[in-house]
Structure formats: structure tokens, C-alpha cells
Amino acid sequence: MKSFYKYIVALMLILPFIACNDEWEEELYTNLVSLKAPVGSEGVTEVYLRYKKDGDGEYNLPVIVSGSQESEKDLNVKIEVDNDTLNIFNQGKYQYRTDLYFKQLPAQFFELPPGPCFIPKGSHTANHKIKFRFSNLNLVERWVLPLTIKDDPSYAVNYRKGWRKALLYIKPFNNYSGSYSATSMNVYADGETNPKAMVMSTKSAWVVDENTVFFYAGMVEDRSEERGDYKITIRFGEPVENADGTRTGTLSVQAENPAINFELLSQPTYQIKKVVDPTLPYLVSEYTTVNIKYKYNDITSIPNMPIRYKAEGSMTMERRRNITIPDDDQAIQW
């Protein structure tokens, strides 16, 4: 009987070694082709590209092959514009708020590579280079380039949500675009005695060209249905270097819509100040301050009854940069 138990114990010790094989040398997962386009809080992929003098920009969209081992064959992944997904996305997210819908980027503002994305044997990733043309692109609208991987028998597509498709929300930036603190910019009802000041916590400045941005007048918000009526463009003139290291200059300001009766009350100016981090010298904070004073009409709050407002004060943007890394490769305040 003791011998029988000895045999049982020995067999239990041997079995794990008999069951083992070289499965680690075999592929554990299917090689699936995907687009690497992580989504943000709005469900789209925010793409920040610096606006260059010629208005062109490039974005490398990563195309990846999943699997525990390298691919055993060359892959030619076909990527095309998806004309259906954006409409479904807008309706599901915003329903009747059509003013919040993302708009599909028109064909004249981008160029896809002429052929498929080539991923060589033994590689897990490749870049699909997309060219953008930002000249005359009106960023009052929110432009998205929707892309998808086209089915093909030569490869398997990853159908997991968010991996086959990409919704690229294009956000060009320049030295002056971004989110400005507006707590020092006061807005008053013009003509009132002792008017109460109104303020916004932030105001966004969007790119027009290399040295020009636009914002919305007064208390008009970025999501307002009528925001396009209150578009104010600001062109930054050539700055002057001061003895204290700051740079200052003047601004050319105008409204696109004559109906708001925009009026500058003084010459607007700007200042740029750089501050190096005391402990991390490769980190630099750049503060851009805009000083402006103007009047405009609110033409939409009460139909056929414009309301005159006066805005005056300053707005400041902080952009923190790592000077050792190109702008496109770091998370900066755009």
C-alpha cells in the first residue's frame, strides 16, 4: 500500500513536466491591425500641429500590429476616409445640439498618402503620413478627419471599439494661440451709471495664420451658436526686445462682422515674458499678455435690439515648454 502511494506522488510530480511544451514559442494572439488614436474627453483624438508659414503641416498616424510575436509577412494596410462614422458619432453624443457637431474636414485641407501603409515583416508599427493645409481653414467650426482601416483578406482588422477607426480633431497652433486667463478682462453694459463688471475665467484664441489668432468678443463663449458673428482677429506685430528681457509690440485688431459695430478705444498692445524654472532649467514658462479696450454690439440676445458693451483689461496665457523637445512632440498649452 505504501508503494502505491509512492507511485501516486511520483506521478503527480512528473505530470507538470510532461504537460509543458514550447507554447511560448507559438503565437498566443492573432495579429490584428489597428490605428493608434487615443481619444480625449470629447471622444475624438486631438491633433496639435504647429501652423507654419506656408500653412502646411504633417501628422504621422501610427498603424500597429498586435500579437506576442513579430509579424511573419509584409502588410499593406489600406486606410481611407470614413464618411459615415462622424455623423453617427455627432448624433449619439450631441443629439439636437447641431451647433456642437464636429464637421468633416473638406478634402482640400488634407492629403492622404497615395498607397497603403506598408508594415514590413518583423515590425509591429508604421506611420501613415497625412499632410494638412491650414490656409483659410476657419476654426470657428470644429474640424475632424474621420479615417478607417479598409477590410482586406491579406490582414485581420481589430474590430474592438476605437481601434479600427480614428476621428482626428485638427488643432493647429502658433505662438499666440491657446487658453488665456480672462479674469482681468472686464465687460460692462455701455452707458450705464456704475455698471457691474462681468468676467470670464478663460478665453480661447484660435489660429488664423502664423502670427494671427481670433477670439470671440466680450462674454461670447466658444460653444455659443452665434459665436461666428463675434469673431475678432488679432495680428501680432513684430516685437521689440526690452532691457529686462521682455518683448513688447502692438496688435492689429478687427471684427469680421460689421453688424456688431466693433470699435477700438485705444491702441492694443502685447507683452511676452519668459521665466526659466529655477530647478529644472530646460523648462521655460512663456507668458503672453494682451491689453485691449473695445466696444461692440450684442446683436443676437434680443432680436432687432442691439445691446452695446464695453470690454477692457488684459488676458494672459502661460505656455510651459521643454526647450529640448520639438513643440509637436510635447504636451504644451496649445
Image (cartoon, rainbow, N blue to C red):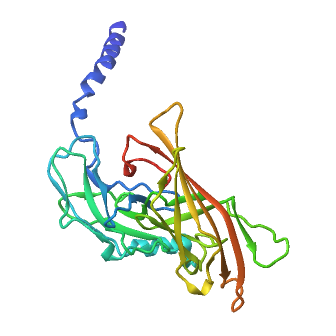
Residue at 52%, 30% in the rendered image? 279
- Horizontal side of 166 relative to 315 (left or right) equals left
Q: Is residue 15 above or below residue 103?
A: above
- Residue 97 or residue 134, whichever sits in front: 134
Residue at 54%, 44% in the rendered image? 244
Residue 155 image position (x, y, % from top left): 21, 57
Instruction: Residue 55: name its quadrant.
Output: bottom left
Q: Is residue 233 above or below residue 327?
A: below
Question: In this view, which residue lies farthest toward the right?
Answer: 193
Question: In this view, which residue lies farthest toward the front?
Answer: 243
Question: In this view, which residue lies farthest toward the top?
Answer: 2
- Residue 248 or residue 322, whichever sits in front: 248
Which quarter of the image is occupied by the N terminus?
top left
- Residue 85 or residue 181, whichever sits in front: 181
> Is residue 8 visible in the rendered structure shown here?
yes
- Horizontal side of 116 relative to 1 (left or right) equals left
Instruction: Residue 6: name its quadrant.
Output: top left
Residue 327 image position (x, y, % from top left): 39, 50
Residue 179 image position (x, y, % from top left): 56, 58
Residue 229 image position (x, y, % from top left): 57, 81
